[in-house]
Amino acid sequence: MKKNLSIFCLFIMFLNIMPCSAIEAVSMQNINSSARKLSQSEYKYTTVLKKYSPLDVSITNNNAKPVLLSSNTEVDFVLKDGSILKSESRRNSYRHSRKRDMGRYYGIALPGALIAGGVTGITFGLGAPLGAAIFIGMCLPMDKAVRSNVKISQDLFKGAQLPISLEPEKTYHVRMLVPKNVGIKKIVISNTSFDMRTMYAITIPVEAL
Amino acid sequence: MKNILKLSLICSLGLLTTGCNQYITSTTNGDVYYGGYNRRDMIHADVKLFQKGTNKICDGSVYLNAPSRSITFKNDRVDAKMVLGCNDGTLIDSNWQLRKGSFSGEGVDQLNNKYSFKTVSKKEYKKVAEHDKIKFINDKSESYLKY
C-alpha cells in the first residue's frame, strides 16, 4: 500500500514537473541579432532622451519559414544583475516623453492679451499691437509642442514597432527605448513561433558599452 | 434666464455628441468583424474590434501620419496605420486611406488572412453588431497588444 502511494506521489510530481519544463522558453534557432546604443547625434528628440536611451536592434531571420509574432509576444530587458524589466508599451513611453501641449498657454493667452491690450490701450495707444504680440507669443510654443510631439509619435510608430512576422532572409531594424541609467545585458522577445503552437524566445545580446 | 437655459441646453447637447465613436466593419471570406474607434489625441485613436459569433476581441490603436483636429479623423487626406492584437494571439496590421467623408483600409494578420475595413453609419453597424456599446480601455496594460 505504501509503495503504491509513493508511486502515485511520484507520478503526480512527474505530472507537475512536465508542464514546467515545457513552458520554459526554448530559444529560436537561426536568428542573427544585435543591439547597439544610438549616439546623441543619431537620435535628436531631446524630450525622449531625458528619460530613455534608444537602442537600435537588428534581427535577421535565417530560417526557411517566416517567424510569427503573436499578441502574447512580450519584450523583456534582462539587466546585469539578472532581474527582468518589462518593456513599456509605445503608448506609455510616448506619454512619458512628450511635451505638454493641449492648452498649455491657451488659457492665459486670450485674457492676458485682452487685459494687457486694454490697459495700455487707454494710456499709450499701443493696445492692439501689444495684445497681439502677447497672444502670438503664448500660442506659438503650444503649436511648437504639438508639432514636436507629432514627430516623436511618428518616430515611435515607424521605428519602434515590431513587425507581425519576420520574413526569411530579411533584416528588420527596430528601435527600443530602455529607461535611462539601467545596465542591460540582453533583450528577450518571448512567444514567437512558426505555427502559433510551439513557442520560442528570441534572445538579443546587447553590445558592451 | 430663458437665454441662459437655451445656451446651456445647446452646450450640453454639444458635449454629449462630441465623444461619439466611429464604427467600422470588415467582411472577408465569410468572417464578419465589427467595431469602432475613438479619437484620443491629435494623432492616435483607440480601436476595438469583435468577431461576430465568436469570443474573439481585438484592440489596439490608429496612428495618423499627420495631426488632425477633426474628431472623426475623416476630414484629413492622410495615411494611417492600425495595429491590433487579439485575445487568440492574432496580430492585425493594416493600412488606412483616409478620405473626406469616409475611409477604407486593408489589413493582414501574421497568418496572411486578409481584412478589409470600412467605416459604416451607426444604423448599418447596429445591423451587424452584437455589442451595442463599445467600451474602450483606459489602462494600456490590459490591452491585448503587449509591446
Image (cartoon, coloured by chain):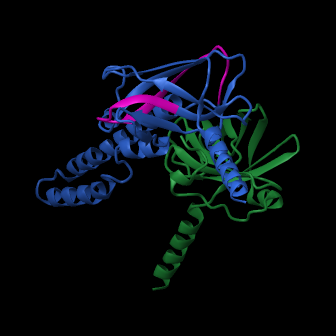
**In which quadrant of the rendered view does residue B75 lie?**
top right
Q: Residue A29: x, y in percent?
A: 62, 21
- Residue drawn at (47%, 30%), measured in percent from left and top? A187
Q: Residue B105: x, y in percent?
A: 71, 37
Dominant secondary-structure state across the stretch colored magenta: strand
Residue A149, placed above or below residue A134? above
Instruction: Tell me if residue A29 is in the magenta stretch.
Output: no
- Residue drawn at (78%, 34%), measured in percent from left and top? B113
**Nearest the eye: A49 or A143:** A49
Q: Colour of chain B?
A: green
Q: Residue B51: x, y in percent?
A: 77, 51
Locate residue A208 relative to residue B90 in the image: left or right.
left
- Residue drawn at (70%, 57%), measured in percent from left and top? A5
Can see residue B17? yes
Q: Which chain is blue?
A: A
- Residue drawn at (74%, 52%), measured in percent from left and top? B56
Count numbered badges in the picture: 0
- Where the C terminus of chain A falls, by quadrant? top left
**In which quadrant of the rendered view does residue A116 lie?**
bottom left
Bounds of the magenta segment: A165-188
Locate residue A92 relative to residue A23 in the image: left or right.
left
**In which quadrant of the rendered view does residue A46 lie?**
top left
